[in-house]
Image (cartoon, helix red, strand yellow):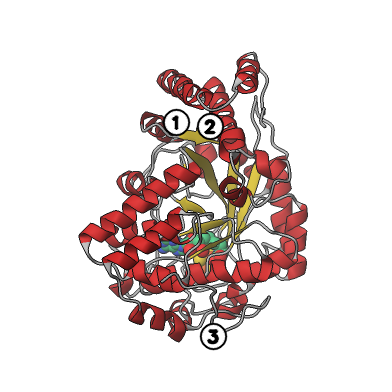
Amino acid sequence: MIYTPEKYSIADKKNVPFIDSKEIWDFINTEASTPEKVREVIKKSLSKKRLSLQETAILINTNDPVLIEEIKEGARQLKENVYGDRIVLFAPLYVGNLCINNCVYCGFQAKNKDVLRVTLEKQDLQKEATALVDSGHKRLILVYGEHPHYSPEFIADSVRTVYGIKSKNGEIRRVNINAAPLDVEGFKTVKESGIGTYQVFQETYHPEAYSKVHLGGIKKDFDWRLTSLDRAQEAGIDDVGIGALFGLYDWRFEVMSLVRHVNHFEAVFNVGPHTISFPRIQNASALNIDKQYLVSDENFVKLVAILRLAVPYTGMILTARESAEIRDQVLRFGISQIDGGTNLEIGGYSKHSEEVQDLNKEQFQINDTRSLNEIIEELISKDYIPSFCTACYRLGRTGEHFMEFSVPGFIKRFCAPNAILTIAEYLEDYASFETKAKGYKMIERKLEELSKTQEIAALQEKLNLLKQGQRDLYF
Ligand code: SAM
Ligand code: SF4
């Protein structure tokens, strides 16, 4: 029954839009879900093979609660077998919210006169990044509205400013970007500043739904956005992040399209995207959307499990848009990155304000307002290893998710030890007394597990060096 190879109505070529809505709906409307098929698809995924669109449609069409549990269990197993127990932590840093577009779901849309427009000057950006370094962060994603002011040079300068910060023992070691699509030259300029991942979310992959919610500005152009990460690849950024904003159109269509986007990258560039994001629409100043496509918690949990199975070697990001409860549920299905201590107010990290969110200062409502330390303590209590690792990117080991997945023993040799080293660094420099005690107990447990299958003397030596004051140690 396993369908390969895949052929789609639109052949995959660089910079050519690849979504055929009718074809995607045909898959959804024709692939029936039976227990045999569902189990076969889960089995294929557990053998670490990406699913085809037909196979993904079978999972999407599964409504039997027993089989849905099997899908979730499959996702849990895949996560355990493939990724282990690390969760990478990062923080978003909004650099500016000027915007020429009118996306009806976003607080920053041009016609929203209630929102306070702010762009961080260099010194303010330094303050924000320093506050994040001082809370223990090592990885940031810089976020921008779409506006001529945020040129590729401006973005590259802000990246360099953030990399230039050193505070006490810490610094930011990886800067990712979430900004508007650029042309190839623009992407090259940004790449030269040393970014990690460049993210552009398609929002919705359905062209008609797209035009209903993007009412003005460059972002109205569906194809320009759809092909943006092809241009990023052409510019040499091989580390890109895709995403859909769930709630704008039927979630089943968006999941299929995300998988189609992955297939497109594999066909054209021989490597899938680094990460997938699946934000759900949250309340925002000036929010004006048709509520018919909002995704229930139940469907959200299901779609995360399906995505995990469909693209086993793509990193999955879950943000503080979701509540602590939902995050806890879907973390088990193979989420690889979450944000911690998130503050969306522009300039909000250095103010250390504990105020309730003011939607006229922020893009949208968040539902997980825990501090980084609280999140780390919780992860540790659930036996995850919170990680700030940036080793692969700094050693030029790009396509790290693919390596984690395909190189035998990679996780045990590199990822797990590096996660342990980075969390030990956090425990030494930033953790509360209780978190430190719990964290070192967790590390002891993980060392004991690792020692059953491999030599850990080099790791123990690096841990001792950390305790003596050395920093930024990795394999
Ligand atoms: N302005 C750039 C753009 O649109 O690509 C940068 C990204 S925007 C600041 C970050 C992302 O936030 C958007 O791509 C969208 O998916 C998401 N977003 C916008 N409004 C949202 C809302 N009300 N709830 C949740 N996510 C939202
Ligand atoms: Fe501007 Fe991005 Fe918000 Fe659209 S989603 S209004 S482009 S900041």
> Of residues 466 and 27, which is closer to you in this image?
27
- Relative to 156, is 214 on the left or the right? left
Crowd class of label 3 (few under 14; some 14 to 19; many from 20; radius 10 Å): few
Dividing the image into 4 quarters, which one contains the C terminus? top right
* Occupied quadrant, residue 396: top right
Q: Earlier in the sequence, mark 1 or mark 2?
A: 2
> Of residues 120 and 237, which is closer to you in this image?
237
Real-space CA distance between mark 1 and mark 2, rounded to the nearest whole angstrom:
8 Å
Say which residue label 2 marks: 135
- Relative to 306, is 231 on the left or the right? right
Q: Amino acid at mark 1?
A: Asn
Q: Earlier in the sequence, mark 3 or mark 2?
A: 3
* 452 in relation to 311, above or below: above
Real-space CA distance between mark 1 and mark 3, rounded to the nearest whole angstrom:
49 Å
Whether ligand 1 has any atom under 8 Å from the Cβ at mark 3 is answered as no
Say which residue label 3 marks: 9
> Of residues 202 and 357, which is closer to you in this image?
202
Check whether the beta carbons of the residues at disc 3 and disc 2 lie within 8 A of each other.
Answer: no
> Which x, y percent locates residue 44?
44, 60
Whether ligand 1 has any atom under 8 Å from the Cβ at mark 2 is answered as no
> Which x, y percent locates residue 162?
68, 43
Query: Mark 2: which secondary structure?
Result: helix
